[in-house]
Amino acid sequence: MSKLSVGIVGLPNVGKSTLFNALLKKQQAYVANFPFATIEPNIGVVPVHDARLHELARVVKESESMDHNPPVIPATIQFVDIAGLIAGAHKGEGLGNKFLSHIREVDAICHVVRAFSDEDTIREGSVDPKSDFEIVKTELDLADYEMVEKVKEKNKGVAPDDLPFFSKKPILVVLNVDEGDLGTSSTLAEKYADELNVGKDQIVVISAKTEAELASLSEGEQKEYLSDLGAKESGLERLAKKAFATLGLITFLTAGEKEVRAWTIRVGSTALSASGEIHTDFMDKFIKAEVVTFEDFVANGGWKGAREAGKARLEGRDYIVQDGDVIDFKVGT
């Protein structure tokens, strides 16, 4: 599927650039392990952490008597750093027009709001998380209204329903807090979900400053740092996972000697369309999909054990793929 993107938006000096730079460092660490196409400076493609992949790699190594684990390739998500916004953006104030055109193109919007206490960082219009969020949201709503008016003017009073409204895009809110507040992230998420009138699962509590520091550490040092903070995974990992869920995405898995990989599909995708993610030719030559749940694949020691235990089943083109299905597609020549 074409890369799905999340636009990072916010007022000046709320920590947007710090967060994005941490994303870019995570991207660089990822690209160091896997070849990747050239990525524009304002786009960060980061891996979605999935512990299941390493477990599958271990099982494949043992079941195939390999002397090393096969390469692990996670799903990725694309973040776009949108030019800073100020009140009046819908009228072209600041970089308003550029901001609005870029954000029309993303699939979801991630609002960064300031909840950290460093008063050495000038606020430049930022007051508190609620008003920061509302300023940006109001600008997007006003831009939607102006777009409708322009279309109606052009179409003699008629506005199509399929316009790219900002209000139709799913949203996430990054609450940028002090490192010391990370321990109360669940309480903060509840508090601001009520204040901002969004679901708790749409809020990610992150210290952008901490993420920037983490990004410069080795994997072992990161784990130690996170452990000291009482966290199991970094804020960026939680952000990537929530972005994935917000966009209605799941992953199916492939596991073999060549690689262990997570493939991105939309919830409700069929086996036929899932096969096309691996190669478009698979859709024309599709015969069957051999499917094992992740749990059964691991418990039975890979493909051979799963087949012998009767846990591998053959599914047709209309089978609805489930998150974590391990699939081997049977295709014709």
Image (cartoon, grey):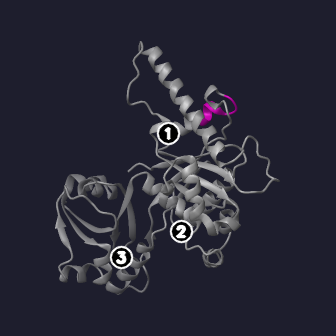
Find disc 3 in the rendering and name its residue.
257
Which amino acid, mark 1? Answer: Glu
Per the rendering, the mark at residue 177 is none
Which amino acid, mark 3? Answer: Glu
Query: Where is residue 211 shown, x and y percent of the image?
Result: 65, 64
Crowding at mark 2 (Cα within 10 Å: few <14, some 14-19, many 20+):
few
Q: How many marks?
A: 3
Query: Where is residue 125 shown, x and y percent of the image?
Result: 73, 40
Find disc 2 in the rendering and name its residue.
33
Q: Earlier in the sequence, mark 1 or mark 3?
A: 1
Task: Kindly identify the residue that appears in the image at 24 percent across and 53 percent down.
Answer: 283
Image quarter in which the C terminus is found: bottom left
Determine whether, in the image, residue 43 is placed left or right of residue 281: right
Query: Where is residue 203 shown, x and y percent of the image?
Result: 54, 55
Determine whether, in the image, residue 311 is placed left or right of residue 92: left
Task: Kindly identify the residue that appears in the image at 24 percent across and 55 percent down.
Answer: 272
Residue toward you, 95 or 257? 95
Determine whether, in the image, residue 296 is placed left or right of residue 147: left
Task: Kindly identify the residue that appears in the image at 39 percent across and 65 percent down.
Answer: 262
- Quarter of the image for residue 30 reads bottom right
* Element type at mark 2: helix
Q: CA distance from mark 2 to mark 3?
A: 18 Å
Which amino acid, mark 2? Answer: Asn
Which stretch appears magenta? 93-99
- Quarter of the image for residue 215 reads bottom right
Find disc 1 in the rendering and name its residue.
105
Q: Earlier in the sequence, mark 2 or mark 1?
A: 2
Classify 48 as above or below 61: above
Mark 1 or 3: in front is: 1
Query: Where is residue 27 shown, x and y percent of the image?
Result: 58, 60
Whether residues under marks 2 and 3 lie with C-beta atoms below 8 angstroms apart, the answer is: no
Q: CA distance from mark 2 to mark 1?
A: 29 Å
